[in-house]
Image (spheres, grey):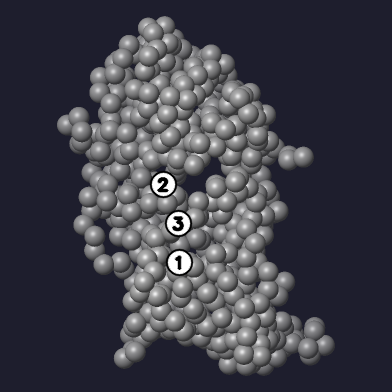
Amino acid sequence: MTTLPDKPALPVRAMTRLYARLAGFGRTATGFVSQPEPRTIGQFAKGRQLLAGNFLFAGYLVEAKDASIWDVPPPATSFEEALHGFVWLDDLAAVGTPAARASMQDWTAQWIERYGRGAGPGWTPDLTGRRLIRWINHALLILSGKGSDGADAFFRSLARQTHFLGRRWSHTTAGLPRIEALTGLVYAGLSLTGMEKYVTTATHSLGRECERLIDAEGGLAARNPEELLEVFTLLNWAALALTEVGKTPAPAHLAAIERIAPVLRTLRHADGGLARFHGGGRGLEGRLDAALAMSGIRADKPREAAMGYARLSCGRTTVIMDAAAPPLGTGSHGAHASTLGFELTSGRRPLVVNCGSGAAFGEDWRRAGRATPSHSTLGLDGYSSSRLSEAKRMGGRKRELLSDGPTEILTERRATEFAVRQQASHDGYRQTHGLVHVRTLELTHDGRGLAGEELLLALNDTDKAQHARMVDATSLQGLPFSVRFHLHPDVDAVQDMGGAAISIALKSGEIWVFRHDGSSELTLDPSVYLEGGRLKPRAAQQIVLSGVSLSETTRVRWSLAKAQETPLSIRDLRRDDPLEDDLD
């Protein structure tokens, strides 16, 4: 049985409930002044599954054929929050059938009847903002064929939620939740009669939040690429909604959009997905490119580095490496021990990946996904490059923070006659083992080969003494380490050449071959791929180079080279639908 996470602290819940009830005494709305162009995009497969009674939210599936969405017993708080956020309206709208429209109307009306007076878990500023955006976007479908009573109840609820948001948006967590709340307030203020008073406040506040949240380079302190995409998308929606009615977004708001766009282009793999680091996933199919196009920001060449990530891109191959220290302290509840980990994508096919965030699959998977062995990098067996602290209560929930990790990251990049070389080092094992990890990645100009070198170094007398003490503690057996290369679950890998190499076949027809210098043991081991929207982790494989560090310098060399191009007769256009794979 799943244990629900801790609820928010009682005073916060009590104040939220109070303001939700008081919001009902505010001025009501009687209709729309204008409606922003609907910009949310749903998933047809998800909408179809909803209509079939398969309720898949936050990694949990509840089957309840012919049941109302509000009669489904929530297995976890995250599932319940997803219901009250109403993003599923996008999926039903993508189906667009009379049955889908009827479900949109019935389930919205039932929410108003059950929870519309301030009851239930949906009355938080971020969920209210998310819900308002969807209700306004899909109002034509929700109100189609409804009489005046249904329309009046709908607009009364919109007004109550808007008043609530106007009073409580500042009481939600800074960052993405607050941006979501303010974007909802902008939408409601522009759209609803009598709510115009909130537009100026929301517009100015959104600008101030952009100044606080987005750094000078266009990144987030959390270093989560998918979270940056979500912020960017909301800022785009709010800016376009304002300009469509002749209003000007705050200068800081527009400046943030301009700063974020090139960062996201840098973190974009060749297949259009995001690099998966620090709790972020690849993003919904097409979401990144749609957001970049919507922004209207001119498409410059991707940068060599952004938000602490180094990018190598040649031919049809992209490599993105985590080349900065992870967030530490209060902002690290989603951070991973991923320093110097990398991902590689060839054309439209991911090849080397990180395992990803396990948050959707429970606390054990969340912790496992944050550890160094879940990333494509070198790790000392039994240790992560950053360590988790004792759980602390934040926002009403207990969260584990990163309290100890690399403090000095050195990077160098240069181009040679035949390749682009990126070198980086971190000191995450220096205090514990006296060792610095140095990684060099070299991608050929045609994108057909990646050569790598891993170094473990004791740099000075203090480091050498610490390393010697750790080796002595192993009875001079040495410090075991592993260099891991997690493979995407769609690739097929086999060990061949007498165990000296591993051949990797992509669905596009490409063949890549992994080789090493023979200084370590090469194995092909099981792995997992943690992907949002799935019912369970996907089985995958990982290439592992295992060895021991006995001396003050340990070196491992490896290469990953394309042995066969994608056949010219094949157009690699097929995309797999994770929902179909899980539920069919």
Discs 3, 2 touching: Cβ within 8 Å: no
Residue depicted at 25% across the width and 23% down the height = 34
Q: Please tell me whether mark 3 or mark 2 is closer to you in this view.
A: 3
Residue depicted at 59% across the width and 42% down the height = 58
Residue nearer the viewer, 353 or 100: 100
Name of the residue lying farthest toward the right: 475
Q: Where is residue 333 in the image (x, y as percent from the top left)?
A: 58, 52
Q: In this view, does 516 lie to the left or right of 465?
A: left
The residue identified by callout 3 is 575
In the structure shown, which secondary structural element does the residue marked by tag 2 occupy?
helix
Q: Please tell me whether mark 1 or mark 3 is closer to you in this view.
A: 3
Name of the residue lying farthest toward the left: 246
Q: Position of residue 277 (x, y in %)?
A: 51, 61
Q: Residues within 10 Å of mark 3 (few under 14, many from 20)?
A: few
Q: Given the image, on which type of amino acid does mark 3 rest?
A: Arg
The residue identified by callout 2 is 230
Q: In which quarter of the image is residue 485?
A: bottom right
Position of residue 358 relative to residue 431, above or below, is above
Q: In which quarter of the image is residue 493?
A: bottom right
C-alpha span from label 3 to label 2: 22 Å
- Which mark, by number, is residue 291? none
C-alpha span from label 2 to label 1: 23 Å
Q: Given the image, on which type of amino acid does mark 2 rest?
A: Glu
- Which mark, by number, is residue 349? 1
Labels 3 and 2: the sequence-earlier one: 2
Residue depicted at 51% across the width and 36% down the height = 48
Residue depicted at 60% across the width and 32% down the height = 53
Discs 2, 1 touching: Cβ within 8 Å: no
